[in-house]
Image: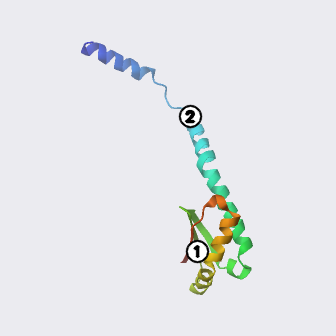
Amino acid sequence: MDGIEQLQNTLKCRRTRKPYSPADLGQIAQQLLDGQISPRQAIFSQVTQAWSHILPAELLRHCEIVDISAGQLMVRVDSPSYMYELQLCSSELLEELQQQCPKARLTRIKFTVA
């Protein structure tokens, strides 16, 4: 095959490519939503509900779940004194969350003061 034939084949391939369409992008977005975002949201929701049932109302008013990633539950607390109280009972909280939400695969609770 000489250079001209190679060039013609290359041009022919470029002309026959299908352009991307919005439907393809929509399908990809839906697959991402179904495969990664929705399951993560379901786990986050389950942990949040369990957290609100486990924690006493007084402590619940002073903290919020910020993130769940790599087995770590991140909780933001509004004052150091409440953070200290939560840290004292963190092992019991973690154990209860692990029992109620096994799909979350929690291994640690980390508290930060906002």
Q: Which numbered disc covers residue 76?
A: 1
| Residue 48 locus on image (x, y percent) | 68, 66
Please tell me which residue lies in front, 58 or 47.
Answer: 47
Residue sitting at x 58%, y 74%: 76
Picture quarter containing residue 109? bottom right
Quadrant including the N terminus: top left
Q: Is residue 84 above or below residue 36?
A: below
Residue sitting at x 73%, y 79%: 57
| Residue 102 locus on image (x, y percent) | 66, 61
Left or right: residue 1 versus residue 64 is left
Q: Which amino acid does label 2 sit on?
A: Asp
**Colour option used:** rainbow
| Residue 18 locus on image (x, y percent) | 49, 25
Picture quarter containing residue 106? bottom right
Question: What residue is disc 2 on?
Answer: 24
| Residue 32 locus on image (x, y percent) | 58, 45
Residue sitting at x 58%, y 65%: 67
- The residue sitting at the bottom extreme is 81
Please tell me which residue lies in front, 9 or 110.
Answer: 110
Helix, strand or loop under label 1: strand
Left or right: residue 10 versus residue 94 is left
